[in-house]
Amino acid sequence: MSLPNEALREFLLAFADDEHLMGQQHTEWIGVAPFLEEDLALASIGQDELGHAVMLYELVCELDGVEPTDEAIDALAYGRGADEYRSCRLVEFATVDWAEALARHWIYDMVEGRRWSFLEDSSYQPLADAAVRASREESYHRRHAEALVNGLLNDPMAQQRLAAAFASLMPMIGGLCASGPWEADIVEAGIASAPTAAIVPELSRFITERFGVELPAGFMAKPDPQTNNDRTQRSEDFAPLMARMREVLDLDLTAQW
Amino acid sequence: MATYEVFLKKDGKDEFRHAGALDAANDELALVMARESYIRRAEGNKVWIVNRENLIVGDDDFVGPNADKPHRHHDGSAVAARRKAIRESDS
């Protein structure tokens, strides 16, 4: 089988960049999450996501014919121009609101779990191997998000805050679930068993069941104004996020790490 | 919130050992938090968590008297001295 290399590279980057930025966002709650145990839990889940990003960046290196050294992976993770990233708006979104962070964790991991499951029987064996490994971790991530949300939904004030958080994140869900223009080739080549957008009906049902919130009809077709649901555009939150990640790196660009 | 005690066991013949405690709103949350607070670096292969309310606790007066029974803590010196004396009288 010949791989559709260009589409595959875009596809891998879209997933890797989501994992990378989501991981970073989760780890930023260390020390400031509502309670100590959650500090550790969310940062640890963030590290799992960073691990997934590394697996995917390694595959990008292989496609590029570059040895997947730490330096090569760092170059992909931190060294590209903003327009070369393929992250979605939801993982770039800056928030200091715990309800939004938790709602995003719930949504992201629900979708991420399904994205990996579409890759478990991939015709591209290295991706299938990565998917099996990531899926084992994902079932725990979902359990963590579900346990917190279920606990909070018993409390009327928490329920209100979660509902408000969902409302503010709603316009970004489309970008997370939208299939990039490269996905037709990916599904055709058997690299993924379904396009990302296949998640939408199930996700809508879960959100309605859990939170009593209906996703507006046709929300997928109503793109987020900042990114147009197109993973080639970065939102206003991307640059500050990247600057935080590069803070130490930028102190001395010639330093050897 | 309730306080839970966390016990871990490694593979093999080791017994469950107390690892620490945590606060959680319910049993399921206690379990997922225990996983990250105490086992994220594979410190154990099995985990028990116990809500502290479910522990059966003996109070200090119940346990205290056993702290004052020196006759139960023989260190073997009396036996050793007697055996030494026998050895020396035999030789």
Image: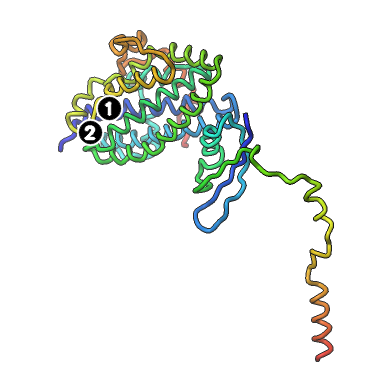
Residue A41 horizontal/vertical position (percent): 52, 32
Mark 2: give few (<14), some (14-19) or many (20+) Cα within 10 Å.
many
Which residue is at the front of the view, A53 or B86?
A: B86
Question: Against B78, is A244 above or below?
Answer: above
Question: What is the chain letter for disc 1?
Answer: A
Residue shown at the point (33%, 18%) measured from the top left: A83
Q: Are marks 1 and 2 in contact (CB under 8 Å)?
A: yes
Direction from residue B68 to residue A198 in the image, left or right = left
Residue shown at the point (76%, 44%) measured from the top left: B59
| Amino acid type, residue under disc 2 in the picture | Ile
Which residue is at the front of the view, A204 or A97?
A: A204
Residue A223 horizontal/vertical position (percent): 32, 10
Look at mark 2 in the image and give the residue it sits on. Answer: A191
| Amino acid type, residue under disc 1 in the picture | Phe
Residue A179 horizontal/vertical position (percent): 27, 21
Mark 1: give few (<14), some (14-19) or many (20+) Cα within 10 Å.
many
Which residue is at the front of the view, B87 or A94?
A: B87
Secondary structure at numbered mark 1: helix
Q: Quadrant of residue A231?
A: top left
Q: Quadrant of residue A49?
A: top left
Residue shown at the point (49%, 16%) measured from the top left: A162
- Which numbered mark, 1 or 2, is in the foreground of this view? 2
Look at mark 1 in the image and give the residue it sits on. Answer: A11
Q: Are marks 1 and 2 on the same chain?
A: yes
